[in-house]
Image (cartoon, rainbow, N blue to C red):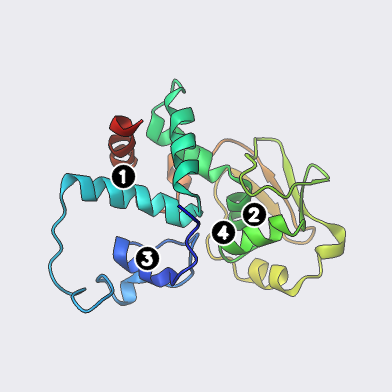
Amino acid sequence: MARYTGPRLRIARRLGTDLPGLTRKIADRRPYPPGQHGKGRQRFSEFKKQLYEKQKLRYNYGVSEQQMRNLFEEAQRSRDPAGLVLLRFLEQRFDNVVFRLGLAPTIPAARQLVVHRHVMVDGKIVDRPSYRVTPGEEITIKPKSRDLERIADSVAAPTLRLPSYLDFDEDSLRGRMESLPKRADTPVQVQENLVVEYYSPRL
């Protein structure tokens, strides 16, 4: 499935939760699904609950279904709980780290900075949004890109506060991953055990 490019708030309202990586707009302003019958009572089967939890992660982090499956398969091979490892992998994505540092207002905006080669890891340009940042690696803005207005605006008013696993210096626009992300660092309200239940019988 291709990456979603439609109305972002519509997705947040459908899933019933804020998706800060996808949009700065808040779903609580209209806390019911979009559409003519959105205010009616929704019936949730077990499958639908699992699907919605999985979709929260997919849309917030901007990954395709195949990418999610690949990440889950890798997470299953870990000694730690698969759901927690999956969340860790998503938080370690390069585009998400750029977003969590406050260099972009959303993950799609961060992905654009990465693809357009504005961001470096340990002094080298990395243009793959899916690159997995590891503890000790340093993220900086390319010298020629430090005066970009969109970066300055985002740093001045970040969407989320800096998570515990990152360190950031606003003056030099220099960030660093200090440790692996923890469960509490995930900004989305999600039940990862339902995501595991969704994928386990399908792989």
Density class for disc 2 (Cα within 10 Å; few <14, some 14-19, many ≥20) is: many
Q: Nearer the viewer, residue 11 or 103?
A: 11
Helix, strand or loop at disc 1?
Answer: loop
User: As drawn, is 4 to the left or to the right of 113?
Assistant: left
Give coordinates of residue 115: x percent, y percent: 70, 56
Nearer the observer: mark 2 or 4; the answer is: 4
Q: Residue at x 87, y 63 (%)?
A: 144
The residue indicated by pointer 1 is 191
The residue indicated by pointer 3 is 11
**Residue type at the position of mark 4:** Ile
Is residue 88 positioned above or below 117 on the image? above
**Residue type at the position of mark 1:** Gln
The residue indicated by pointer 4 is 107
The residue indicated by pointer 2 is 98
Q: Residue at x 23, y 49 (%)?
A: 49
Which numbered disc flags the more N-terminal residue, 2 or 1? 2
Is residue 182 positioned above or below 39 on the image? above
Density class for disc 4 (Cα within 10 Å; few <14, some 14-19, many ≥20) is: many
Give coordinates of residue 107: x percent, y percent: 56, 59
**Residue type at the position of mark 3:** Ile
**Residue type at the position of mark 2:** Val
Helix, strand or loop at disc 3?
Answer: helix
User: As drawn, is 41 to the left or to the right of 23?
Assistant: left
Q: Residue furthest bottom?
A: 36
